[in-house]
Image: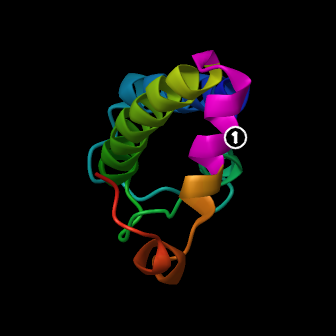
Amino acid sequence: MQPAQLEDLASRLQHLRDALTRRDGGDRPIAEDDPLLEEARACDFMLPEPLTEAALAHTVQHKLENVAVLLERARRHASLPRAAQVAAEQEYLATDEDLRAAPPQA
């Protein structure tokens, strides 16, 4: 993902986390027609089971932490010279078989 996409996702997750914090519903189940559930689904991550406000808040916080790590990596990658970006992307796309076939590096 590009840094801009990750920043957008982080913003949506922060909004969701803040809304859940304001509710402070604890173990109250989330209704299927709840707007926060729609927001969570739009962020495209696995929803917790059972689906309670506390469980969703925990999941959103965990997802925010993961996105922060990915965003840092994406920014570092974007700051590399283009040739280094291409080399990193090619290595990332290499299969285990490709890596086993490559000669060892000294």
Q: Residue at x 51, y 28 (%)?
A: 71
Q: x%, y% of residue 101?
A: 47, 80
Residue 99, above or below 80: below
x then y, percent, for residue 24: 32, 32
Q: How is colour applied across the structure in the image?
A: rainbow
Q: Label 1 sits on what residue type? A: Val
Which residue is located at x 56 percent, y 21 percent? 75
- Horizontal placement of 36 versus 70: left or right? right
Q: Give x and y (percent) for residue 29.
A: 41, 59
Rendered image quadrant of residue 51: bottom left
In the image, residue 75 above or below residue 92 = above
- Which residue occupies the foreground of this view, 13 or 57? 13
Say if the magenta span includes residue 97. Answer: no
In the image, taking residue 20 as reference, residue 5 lies left or right, namely: right
Q: Which residue is mark 1?
A: 86
Pick whichever, 11 or 83, lies toward us: 83
Q: Is residue 44 visible?
A: no
**Residue 60 picture location, percent across and down:** 42, 42
- Viewed as shown, does residue 104 lie left or right of 47? left
Q: Residue at x 60, y 16 (%)?
A: 79
User: Where does the magenta region start and end?
Assistant: 79-89
Return the residue nearer the eye: 14 or 19. 14
Residue closer to the observer: 2 or 103: 103
Instruction: Using the image, determine if residue 47 lies above or below residue 54.
Output: below
Q: Quadrant of residue 63?
A: top left
Classify the position of the N terminus by image quarter. Answer: top right
Determine whether the residue tagged by mark 1 lies in a helix, strand or loop. Answer: helix
